[in-house]
Structure formats: C-alpha cells, structure tokens
Image (spheres, helix red, strand yellow):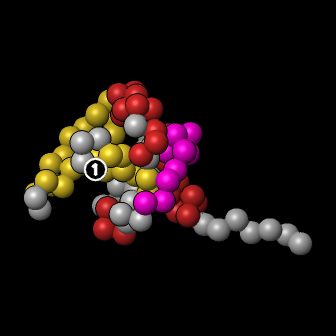
Amino acid sequence: MENKKVSLTQAIKLLPKGRYVHTFRDEVGILFGCDFRKKDIIELMRKHKHTLELTGKNARAMDHGLAIDDAGYLFIKTDKDKMDLFDKPVSRNI
C-alpha cells in the first residue's frame, strides 16, 4: 500500500452510489468479499478514520481505491470517476 492518508470526508465522497458497498480482504492469497450497507461502512470508516488510506494500483484496478486497517486491511469499493477526479493534480492559474 502507498500509505497515502485520506480524510473521512474525502473518503465518504469517493464511495459509489447505492445502498451497499463491496469490500474485500486478502487473506493468505485468497480474496474474501462482502457487501456492507453504506451506512455501516461509513460508521466503520469513522471508527478507523486514522487508518483511512488510498490503495495501490492492484486494488484500484478492481475499483477498490480505499482501505482501512481493521484487523488487517479492508479494501473498499470506490467510484472510478470520482477517484479519477480525486487523483488529478490541481492546476493553478498564475
């Protein structure tokens, strides 16, 4: 993981639309997936807000751009378009 921290507010904005959010854990090379109600994943993110991070290229390739350290990394699905906008550098007019 890149260990680039993200704020809780930023993380919530990156979540996909809908009532459920897909997550997964990588346990000894096996991916375990689970859908959370969005309100529950936000509550979990609040609880672990100090460990919210942007993920690396492998997890992002699967549209899981956020992770929290909750007894091991929990990878959280993000909206691809929102992630693309989030990653763009801010241009400044001089």
Query: Does 37 appear above or below 24?
Result: above
Where residue 9 appears, as percent x and y from the top left, is: 56, 39
Q: Name the residue under label 1.
A: 73
Along the horizontal axis of the image, is 91 left or right of 83?
right
Residue 50 visible in the current orientation: yes
When asked about the image quadrant of residue 26, the answer is bottom left
Give the quarter of the figure containing the N terminus.
bottom left
Bounds of the magenta span?
3-11
Where residue 84 appears, as percent x and y from the top left, is: 52, 62
| Label 1: few (<14), some (14–19) or many (≥20) C-alpha neighbours in 10 Å | some
Residue 76 visible in the current orientation: no
Give the quarter of the figure containing the C terminus.
bottom right
Residue positioned 55% across, 64% down in the render: 87
Where residue 12 appears, as percent x and y from the top left, is: 50, 40
Query: Does 3 appear above or below 39?
Result: below
Label 1: element kind: strand
